[in-house]
């Protein structure tokens, strides 16, 4: 399944919320999970960490990646990237320049480009679809299914076999 990296609020200047940043492919996800497990601290309660790293909470990483797809055709997807290299650090302010020798793309993009690529919310119509779906699922599983079980159990031996005719 896809894995998304979030952008910190100070990187996008959109609000005090994290923004959906980059969508990693499967290989990138595995690399990031392995990096987080190496960086995490078992003594702080991390049950999946492999070593006793320095990080107690709040995994942050900088990555060097290639944009594979912008996902312009789907407004709910963020750009997909193929990970080349990544580092974990508490201070990522100059990590791209110091570790990878390249500019941080968030410093290169204009505010308009950031607002186009990264979002803190989903479209209102998507939320409405989810609410409609959830409501219909509650009605079908909570009302129709139990009603069908009750009708099948108690009304199948009624005179005139009306239940059987309706059921067919």
Image (spheres, rainbow, N blue to C red):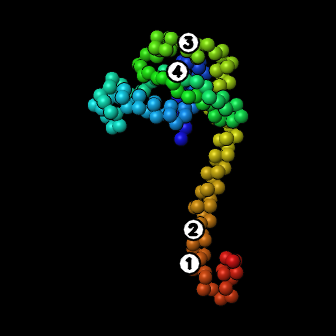
Give the answer, above or below, for where 108 lies relative to 39: above
Q: Residue at horizontal 55%, vertical 15%?
A: 104
Q: Residues within 10 Å of mark 3 (few under 14, many from 20)?
A: few
**Could you tell me if residue 159 is visible in this image?**
yes
- Answer left or right for 167 relative to 29: right
Question: Which mark is on residue 111?
Answer: none
**Could you tell me if residue 20 is visible in this image?**
no
The numbered mark, 3 or 4, whose residue comes first in the sequence reads 4
Marks 3 and 1, how far apart at CA: 69 Å
Query: Can you tell which of label 1 and label 4 is closer to the viewer?
Result: 4
Residue designated by label 3: 103
Marks 2 and 1, how far apart at CA: 11 Å
Q: Residue at horizontal 66%, vertical 28%?
A: 70
Q: Secondary structure at mark 4?
A: strand
Residue designated by label 4: 64
Along the viewing direction, whichever of 143 and 21 lies nearer the viewer: 21
Marks 2 and 3, how far apart at CA: 60 Å
Give the answer, above or below, for where 72 lies relative to 160: above
In percent of width and height, residue 52 lies at 29, 28
Question: Which mark is on residue 153?
Answer: 1
The numbered mark, 2 or 4, whose residue comes first in the sequence reads 4
Question: Which mark is on residue 146?
Answer: 2
Q: Secondary structure at mark 3?
A: loop
């Amino acid at each position: 399944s896809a894995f998304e990296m979030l952008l910190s609020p100070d990187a996008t200047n959109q609000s005090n919320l994290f923004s959906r940043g980059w969508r990693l492919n499967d290989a990138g996800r595995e690399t990031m999970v392995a990096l987080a497990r190496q960086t995490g601290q078992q003594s702080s309660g991390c049950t999946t960490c492999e070593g006793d790293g320095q990080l107690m909470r709040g995994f942050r990483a900088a990555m060097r990646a290639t944009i594979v797809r912008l996902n312009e055709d789907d407004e709910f997807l963020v750009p997909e990237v193929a990970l080349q290299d990544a580092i974990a650090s508490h201070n990522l302010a100059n990590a791209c320049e110091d570790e990878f020798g390249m500019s941080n793309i968030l410093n290169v993009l204009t505010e308009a480009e950031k607002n186009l690529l990264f979002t803190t919310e989903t479209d209102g119509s998507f939320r409405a679809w989810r609410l409609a779906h959830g409501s219909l699922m509650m009605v079908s599983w909570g009302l129709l299914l139990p009603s069908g079980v009750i009708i099948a159990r108690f009304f199948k031996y009624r005179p005139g076999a009306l239940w059987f005719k309706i059921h067919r």
